[in-house]
Image: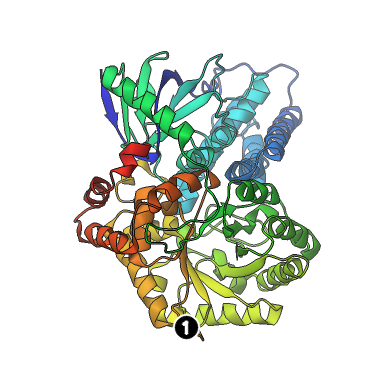
Amino acid sequence: MQTFSGVGVAPGRVLGPVRQMPKPIQEPAGPGTAAIPADATVDSQGQRIKDAAKAVQAELRARAAKASGEGKEVLEATALMAADPMLVKSAIKLLKPETPGGARTAERAVWEAGGTVAESLKALGGYMAERVADVLDVRARIVSELRGLPAPGIPASDIPFILAAEDLAPADTATLDPNKVVALITSSGGPQSHTAILARALGLPAVVAAPGVDEIDDGTEVYVDGAAGTVTTWPGEELRAAAEAWAVQASTLAAFTGHNVLADGVRIPLLANVGTGADAVKAADAGAEGVGLLRTEFCFLDRDEEPSIEEQVSAYGAVFAAFPGKKVVVRTLDAGADKPLPFLTNADEPNPALGVRGYRTDHSSPGVLERQLQAIAAAEAQHEAEVWVMAPMISTAEEAARFANLCQAAGLKTPGVMVEVPSAALTADTVLSHVSFASLGTNDLTQYAMAADRQLGPLATLNDPWQPAVLKLIKLTAQGAATARNASGQPKPVGVCGEAAADPALAVVLIGLGVGTLSMSPRALAGVAAVLKTVTVEQAQQLAAAALAAPSAAEARHAVRDKLPVLDELGL
């Protein structure tokens, strides 16, 4: 028996045999060692590369068409990268005999070009460095296409298994079959990586940043505890019993009723994070009391130009239709950083995470935001949903005021801001004096507060929403909202739409800090509701105080979980 420790990112206790992701595709032979076909020309080999890139893009787009939510977004972004002219042009240049080292085969040219692009992105750091895995994934797929081999992917199996890897390529993670893959374990990655986010969306127990799990032999039986963040090989009877107990608990966990209340009767609405109309229908079926985050990026991804107002009206309307009479919070376009758009953002920024993204794109590309607000207003007029609109990456009260004016001009009555920049939390009273509400994006707030790239495994302990510094920023936001009261004298609403809301223990702390609504993946609704109904506001406030007083994220989590035995009872 051996235990590996990492970061638990999705709860659950399961047993199963390990299947390792296939090792990366073998590097093609270099110039001078690989035979180039006698009849090959630069043009013919270049055309092969172009055709292979198009085939990979088409395959990824086809998979995206069958996916939804986060999976769809990831696949569309990866498909866009497969057609990146920089990658293809760089590869074609390496086919020429005058290139240093001599002519390459098409496979080798793609390999070297992809490596160069990846190194360039890695050197930029921040969000651009996060795209390295995408580039290397696309490179492997194009080389496989050139060789006539199947694309890299999830191993086939006749029985359910636990998937282990160093990390998972976004395009693979996006199409996992939860009927076959019962848990995910990776040796790298972080709590906000694609692997972590999609595991939560699929409801798969997952542990990331656990060194060594990518070396476990295929077929080894392991026990995964997604809450504790541990992976144990050849588990004994005690762990087997824990897995059996969790299976029973998970199957009997009551579905969310659509009306969340604490033990003292206080209402805390539980909302859903969605991206498309299909997502919204599933969220409504799961009992979500509304939408706390409508990601509008899906309308804009995989395009060379801005979608028309009519296209946007249709896309937003499909979400509004699923929630008649209920709140739908729309986040305006969060382009930039890991979501570059050719018609809106600059790929040459030295540090895109701190660059022109979100609301800031309105200064560099004026008009796009105003047209989006017009489309949201037009869609609202056609449906019965209660539409709230918020801007991402707001840093100052001046920006909040300007966004509120833009909303008013478009006929939108409830403007708000995302609090994901520490400056917005620190000055929440003045920022919120100009708008109607705030929503905390805990993923980015944690990244910016801790100066820790949210995708990097070595920084996983820093990039943790349980960090006392992050919790203090959340409390400051709630206090600012209480100061900036609305016309009826009530504190302005503050919600959380980041991944922190899906952690049942942290959800209790968030309520204790003054948060009034929580938005999450629909799969997390039942678990969060089951825990919240066992505590009162006063108890939540006491647990929040304990978390704030802890010297570290680990001790904050431990202090709270120790006082919530219901978490162990439910296996959460």
Q: Secondary structure at mark 1?
A: loop
Q: Nearer the viewer, residue 192 or 178?
A: 178
Is residue 201 rendered to the left or right of residue 36?
left
x, y (%) of residue 64? Answer: 68, 39
- Residue 170 visible, this angle: yes
Q: Which residue is mark 1?
A: 433
Residue drawn at 54 percent across, 82 percent down: 401
Q: How many C-alpha atoms fall within 10 Å of the one at disc 1: few (<14), some, or many (≥20)? A: some
x, y (%) of residue 208? Answer: 38, 36
Is residue 76 rendered to the left or right of residue 468?
right
x, y (%) of residue 145? Answer: 67, 25
Q: Amino acid at mark 1?
A: Ser
**Compared with residue 268, is residue 521 higher up or lower down, i.e. above or below?**
above
Picture quadrant where residue 306 is located: bottom right
Q: Nearer the viewer, residue 501 or 101?
A: 501
- Residue 351 visible, this angle: no
Q: Nearer the viewer, residue 81 or 33?
A: 81
**Quarter occupied by the C terminus:** top left
Residue drawn at 36 percent across, 20 percent down: 222
x, y (%) of residue 55? Answer: 72, 31
**Compared with residue 404, is residue 308 higher up or lower down, i.e. above or below?**
above
